[in-house]
Image (cartoon, rainbow, N blue to C red):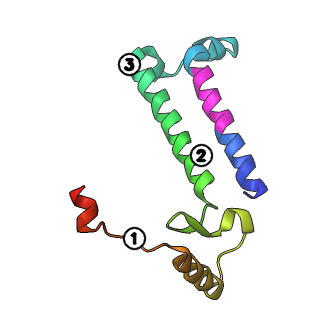
Amino acid sequence: PPAWVQYSLRAVRVSQAGVGVFFFFGEQLLAAMGRQPFEFMQETPMNLAVHIGFLYGFNVIADMLKSINAFEVVYNGHVLHSKLSSGAFPDAGQLTKKLKAALKDKKPTQRPTKDAVAS
């Protein structure tokens, strides 16, 4: 993936860690800075729900960033094109050639004969 995606993923992961630290030590950190705890921090269920919401939101962002460059064309287990490895979208002509080659490699399935079923 491009550098900006990698740095964005790192930033999201650091933010997730920050949410976890703030869940356990938020009141102490705010008190050390001379600030009052936020209103939602007074109730444990609400505090937990807010932090889980932030963690989930950051996870959604991270998943989107990871899949932003994923583009693969696969037929029957044959990778016809991978944007992750080539860094480009597939050329239609080359993709067609690779698909035809994959179709030639495909072995025809044989139906069992009556003799094979009976034994």
> Where residue 17 sits in the image (x, y, percent)?
64, 28
Question: What's the amino acid at mark 2?
Answer: Ala
Asked if the magenta segment contains residue 15, the reply would be yes
Looking at the image, is mark 2 or mark 1 earlier in the sequence? Answer: 2
Residue 87, image x, y percentages: 73, 68
Provide the residue span drawn in magenta.
Answer: 13-22
Quadrant assignment for the N terminus:
bottom right
- Please name the residue shown 23% across and 67% down the image: 114
Residue at 48 percent of width and 72 percent of height: 107
Q: Nearer the viewer, residue 115 or 14?
A: 115
Residue 4 figure quarter: bottom right
Residue closer to the observer: 99 or 65: 99
Query: Magenta region's main secondary structure?
Result: helix
6 or 91: which is nearer to us?
Answer: 91
Q: Could you classify mark 1 by the number of other residues whose Cα lies within 10 Å: few (under 14), some (14-19), or many (20 or more)?
A: few
- Amino acid under disc 3: Pro
Quadrant of the snapshot with the C terminus: bottom left
Q: Is residue 64 placed above or below 23 in the rendered structure?
A: below
Residue 5: image tag: none
Residue 104: x, y in percent?
54, 80
The residue under the point 56% across, 75% down is 105
In this orientation, does residue 43 appear? no
Q: Which is nearer the eye, 99 or 12?
A: 99
Q: Kindly identify which residue carries mark 3.
A: 45
Q: CA distance from mark 3 to mark 1?
A: 58 Å
Mark carried by residue 62: 2
Query: In this rendering, is residue 33 above or below 54?
Result: above
- At mark 2, the secondary structure is helix
CA gap, disc 2 to disc 1?
Answer: 42 Å
Element marked by disc 1:
loop
Q: Is residue 32 left or right of residue 117?
A: right
